[in-house]
Amino acid sequence: MKDFPAAYQASAGSALDVDKDLYRSIAESVDSRRLVDRFAIPIRSGRAWKVPAGHVFRIVTIEGPQVADLNLWSLHNPRERMWASRTRQLQAAHVTVFDRLWSTLPYLRPIATITSDSLASYGIDEFGGRIHDLLGTRCDPYVNRMLTGEDFDFCCHSNLVRAVAPHGLTELDVHDVLNVFQCTGLNAQDKYFMRASPARTGDHLEFFAEIDLLCALSTCPGGDLSVPLWGPEARDPLEVCRPLGIEVYEVDKAVLAGWKPPSVAVYGGGHGLGLKSPPWAKTS
């Protein structure tokens, strides 16, 4: 199959032109970092936490493979949140080091950048599967009820709802996710597939917070996705569900010399709302 150029290209100096030297320095600054928070998220649950701009946070497989669903918001304005579909267009459908997670309109800026990924070398497997996807979204109790006729309150959507409630957010704030440690792709019928996570104990995905963030993560009730969730062979995957660890670090300010949080988008128009007709319209 012929390769075809990406729709969005990174030209020198553009917003898509990442300063790789900076993010390499951040990734390599492990010895000079200061740990500010560390906790575990139990199986089939969720938790939210804050990450100041200029800090990094890691998601770690502390007991073996486990997939997770990640949401991000601006800490001070939750209307600005991670935009999965635009990130998929600007970066990739599966993200890794140097890829950035972008926020929704009208803000449109990178809110987190991936600095380290222990599974970056996985590449593409024989089925076309890759790691850390923006293709799918969180499992939810509505689809579960539709497909099984049963209520289940510990889908990733519900886990995230419970996680953000103490921060004043609701179900309406939960959004499309980054599927961390999840191996996915599109099959020959152009349908989304999921494979067992290849993660091992100690694997991690690390992010640099470009702005003050509120983060939330759900440990998926599907565990490592090695057990069929649908169809005639489906069974409860409880035995392959594992907790995940979160670590938050302050980065040495010397490493961040010259860095500053990105500004929101500078589009200055009014969407044409004040115009009687568009400028290219014919006039008599």
Image (cartoon, rainbow, N blue to C red):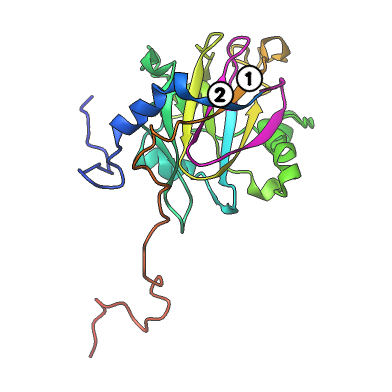
Instruction: State the residue in front, 205 or 192.
Output: 205
Quadrant of the frame with the C terminus:
bottom left
Q: Taking 237 as reference, is 182 left or right?
A: left
Instruction: State the residue in front, 131 or 55.
Output: 55
Gap in angstroms between the C-alphas marked 2 and 1: 7 Å
Magenta span contains residue 92:
no
The circle drawn on residue 1 is none
Residue at the spot 24% in from the left edge and 87% down from the top edge: 283
The circle drawn on residue 244 is 1
Magenta span contains residue 41:
yes
Residue at the spot 48% in from the left edge and 26% down from the top edge: 206
Dot 2 or dot 1: first in sequence order is 2
Q: Which residue type carries mark 2?
A: Ile
**Callout 2–callout 1 Cβ contact below 8 Å:** yes
| Quadrant of the rendered image containing residue 49 | top right
Q: Which residue type carries mark 1?
A: Leu
Q: Secondary structure at mark 1?
A: strand
The part of the chain drawn in magenta is: 39-68
Residue at the spot 75% in from the left edge and 43% down from the top edge: 166
Q: Which residue is mark 2?
A: 59
Q: x%, y% of residue 165?
A: 74, 44
Q: Taking 21 as reference, is 260 left or right?
A: right
Q: Secondary structure at mark 2?
A: strand
